[in-house]
Image (tube, helix red, strand yellow):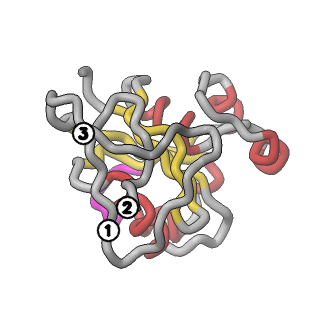
Amino acid sequence: MPPTCTPTLPVILTPSADSSPPQRDSNLDDGSSVTDGRGSPDRVTVGIGLRPGTTSDRIVRAVEEVVGQYRIACLATLDTRAAEPEVRAAAAILGVALFGFTAEELSAVEVAHSSPRTESAVGTPSVAEAAALLAGNGESVCGRTIVDGIVVAVAYADPI
């Protein structure tokens, strides 16, 4: 199977062998993975969107599947999810900071993919992608990718 997503700025993503294959968002391209020859970004921010009660093990597996070899600067999500013990545990396992943003803050971010269902459920049309962009420098590496029901998005943490 191809890697997890089609990056906005091409990079190689390395899926882990022991997790379920990612689902492609129907709005994304063909799923091919290439590199632009510039190498990897120094660090990335990872936005996550998930249902309440998602276990830390599932979160870590999903993040690692999408991020692969890159250094994670932080996790970011909706403030109510950031308060959940399993989300906090996932950040601790990954050894990164955790940022929570309000639905209002997330709603103000322009994203490539929005969901009316997400907006109805939590008050913002995007959680993972908007959170990654807010926590990072605003430049997307990889838009939303769904792994085991968890939405993961990645943005550059450092200037490129």
Q: Earlier in the sequence, mark 3 or mark 1?
A: 1
Closer to us: 32 or 116: 32
Which image quarter holds the N terminus?
bottom left
Q: Residues within 10 Å of mark 1 (few under 14, many from 20)?
A: some
Q: Is residue 70 above or below residue 38?
A: below
**What amino acid type is highlighted by mark number 2?**
Glu
The secondary element bearing badge 2 is classed as: helix
Circles 3 and 1, Cβ within 8 Å, touching? The answer is no
> Can you give x and y, in whole percent of width and height, for residue 140 in the image?
42, 30
**What amino acid type is highlighted by mark number 1?**
Ser
Q: Residue furthest bottom?
A: 18
In which quadrant of the rendered view does residue 14 lie? bottom left
Residue carrying label 2: 65
In the shown orientation, is residue 100 left or right of residue 43?
Answer: right
Residue carrying label 3: 43
Q: Earlier in the sequence, mark 3 or mark 2?
A: 3
What residue do we see at 69% from left, 29% from top?
A: 107
What residue do we see at 55% from left, 68% from top?
A: 148
In the shown orientation, is residue 96 left or right of residue 123?
Answer: left
Q: Is residue 87 above or below residue 48?
A: below
Is residue 96 in the magenta section?
yes
> Can you give x and y, in whole percent of width and height, for residue 118 in the image?
75, 46
Q: What is the span of residues highlighted in magenta in the rendered image?
A: 92-98
3D distance between C-alphas at marks 3 and 2:
16 Å
Residue carrying label 1: 16
Q: Earlier in the sequence, mark 1 or mark 2?
A: 1
> Can you give x and y, in whole percent of width and height, for residue 18 in the image?
36, 78
Circles 1 and 2, Cβ within 8 Å, touching? The answer is yes
